[in-house]
Amino acid sequence: MADKLEVGDRAPNFELPAVYGYKAGATSPSAEEGVTIKLKDYESKNWVILAFYVFDASPEDTRAMVCFNEWNRKFRTKEVELFGISWNGLQSHRQFTEIYQLGFTLLADEHKKVTDLYGVTEEVDDLGQMVKRIHRTTFVIDKTGMIRGIWDDIEDLREHPREVWEFIQKEKGV
């Protein structure tokens, strides 16, 4: 696992396969093939929110991603791109996106390289056996590629997107 990232650090670049968000009346996101997202493509264009979560369709992560979805339109008005990242594959992301009509892109870190790069994994006791999983963490990255905010102790999944929104407004002076 990488050293723990801190505010002020340069965000590690990555390239991951992706499923675009749901758009009512548009072609299903399932129709998109071979889409990859590179963090460096957003430098000097948009701020980026990286929301690392454990598992598509788990009750907690569904709540978190649906709440982020409710705020996504506001994020976009301020030139902020939202990405959800988990270890699930593209097919799982497609289903999750379609069922919950998520309007933002989900990234598939199936090889667990980006979660390790960002230091967002943890060992937890699962029925007496220690297993590695993603620790829910959110990063806000500015246009220069610098990490401006990190949330790694998220208490209220429903209110978390509001906290991120208020932070971005303050940081951008909006």
Image: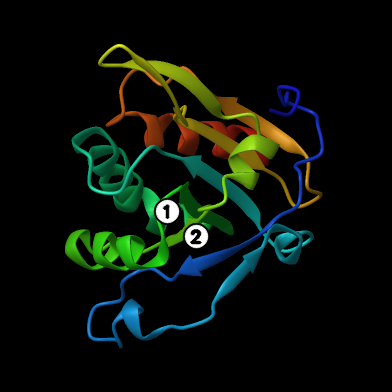
Q: Residues within 10 Å of mark 1 (few under 14, many from 20)?
A: few
Kindly indicate the quadrant of the structure image that contains residue 104. bottom left
- The quadrant the C terminus occupies is top right
Q: Which residue position holds label 1? A: 74
- Residue type pointed to by label 2: Thr
* Residue 174 seen anywhere in this rendered image of the structure: no
Circle 2 sits in a helix, a strand or a loop, which is it? helix
Residue in the image at 47% along x and 83% along y = 33
Rendered residue at 76%/60% (across/down): 40
Q: Quadrant of the N terminus?
A: top right
Q: Amino acid at mark 1?
A: Lys
Choose between 34 and 98: the one closer to the eye: 34
**Mark 1 in CB contact with mark 2 (< 8 angstroms):** yes
Image x and y of residue 53, in percent: 41, 39
Q: Is 44 left or right of 87, judged from the image as shown?
A: right
Q: Position of residue 163 (x, y in %)?
A: 44, 29
Q: What's the image's color scheme?
A: rainbow
**Seen in the image, is 93 located left or right of residue 84?**
left
- The image quarter containing residue 16 is bottom right
Q: What residue does disc 2 label?
A: 77
